[in-house]
Amino acid sequence: MKRLLPLLLATSSLATAQTPTGKITSPTPAPPVPGFTLAPPPPTYAPMKMGKFTFDVQEKMRYEVRDNNFDFNSALNSPQDAAWLLQRFRLGVGYDVNPWIKLYVQGQDVREIGGSRARQIGVGGAEGDDIFDILKAYVQLGNAKKGFSATLGRQFLSYGDQRLIGPLEWANQARTFDAFKLRYTSSKWSLDAFTASPVTFTNNKWNKSDLLDQRDNRNAFLSGLYFSTLFVPFNTTTDFYALHYRDDGTANFGAPIGSTSFVTLGTLWKGDPKKLNGFDYDTEMDFQTGKVGGRSLTAYAGHWGAGYNWLKSSWKPRFGIQYNYASGDGSPNDGKVGTFQNLFPTNHLFYGYMDTTAWQNVHNPQVNFSFMPTPKMKVMLDYHLYWNANNADAWYRANGATRVRPLNAASSSASSFRGQEFDLTVSYKFNPHVALLTGYSYFVAGQYLRDTGFSSNAQFGYVQMQIDF
């Protein structure tokens, strides 16, 4: 608690976090709806033009303080119970060969300063270091806003609300793919077809995907079709998609792990409050089938939300409720998998800003409230409740892999109630290029934590400054 006091006195707070993904890198997400955004407004991306060249620069710094976020144990001062500064610098250069051929490359340097966590990305929860490397490098053919276009090379992928595929800009290093993407855009609909291999970030080495580095024979690829329409008149978007993920597995102490190959079928609907008298709704539902680690997969997930926007108020208040569900595995030894596979999401936006939760094996009701006291400031208040969908499965963190608690004899007989989280976020946009984001989250441990081990409450606070040109 002492570590958080200086931060709390200096700021109001809360958590969010999408930064601009850049230029011609991603399919267009659902059109924004005033008062119905999950993240506060970031700085405006406006590359500097010099003839056929464009240049962009980003500098982001975030000071974080965490307490009990990983072990829920106040008696132990682990490396994750500390404060550190995350720093990210990006420099991008584009060149328009002609109106139908564009080249773009962007370098990135990320550092974690202070604290005692490992400097390796993903080790012990660390953001880590990755000295200047290539984040994006692609060629775009055609006009991405009309007709056919293609993008080939290292790029961000972002679809729908990013519950399954997003650039994860909250993470210091973000997420990028070596990909080929074909797109057709009309006035009422667009269709993307893509295949992509996720890039692994490794400090002091060139970051590579399985497309460029076959040493472990993993062959991890995500492919899909994403169809986005404006045909439903009261929706801002109505999307349908089919995604396929494959991973041939790796060796584990000489024993091969079974291969993974499964399909995700889903749909996303988002209502427009301007056409629904201030009301809005959104839902995303998914079904998965195939194999994971050589075991047959059948899994489900859904998000259902509704809210009301006071459109005539200058403060743009919105009150909403939502419920998120993802299936868990009922038996680890039956040769079947029931855990929903969260793919490559931006989970930080959806299931609590302390990042304890993925869209896997979870029940998550929420209450959300936001308002804008000035055109430059947005305040968000969120309340979360969490249960395991199935106690025979684990509680997965936001990365979809790390488990909050190992499964043991106590897990199956424990309560399924994980706890509750309170989030407060404040963003302030000084001008089109500079924005401040500050946040505080408090997690109240539930009976599941008490039944399976340590159960101290947890805290998280931060202040972030971002500059984009």
Image: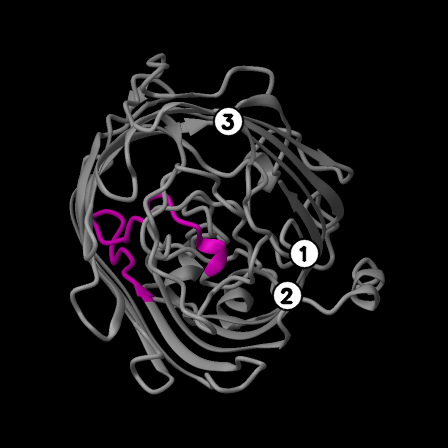
Q: Amino acid at mark 1?
A: Asn
Q: Which residues are magenta?
A: 325-349
Q: In x, y percent, where is residue 269?
A: 25, 66
Q: Which residue in the protein does label 1 denote?
A: 431
Farthest-out residue, top: 215
Quadrant of the frame with the N terminus: bottom right
**Distance in Å between CA atoms under marks 1 and 3:** 32 Å
Q: Is residue 19 above or below residue 111?
A: below
Does label 2 or label 1 sit earlier along the sequence? 2
Say whether disc 1 or disc 3 marks the residue closer to the N-terminus: 3
Q: Nearer the viewer, mark 1 or mark 3?
A: 1
Residue 407 position, x and y percent, is 41, 52
Disc 2 and disc 3 in contact, CB within 8 angstroms: no
**Mark 2 touches mark 1? (CB < 8 Å):** no
Amino acid of disc 2: Leu
Residue at image mark 2:
14
Q: Is residue 423 magenta?
A: no
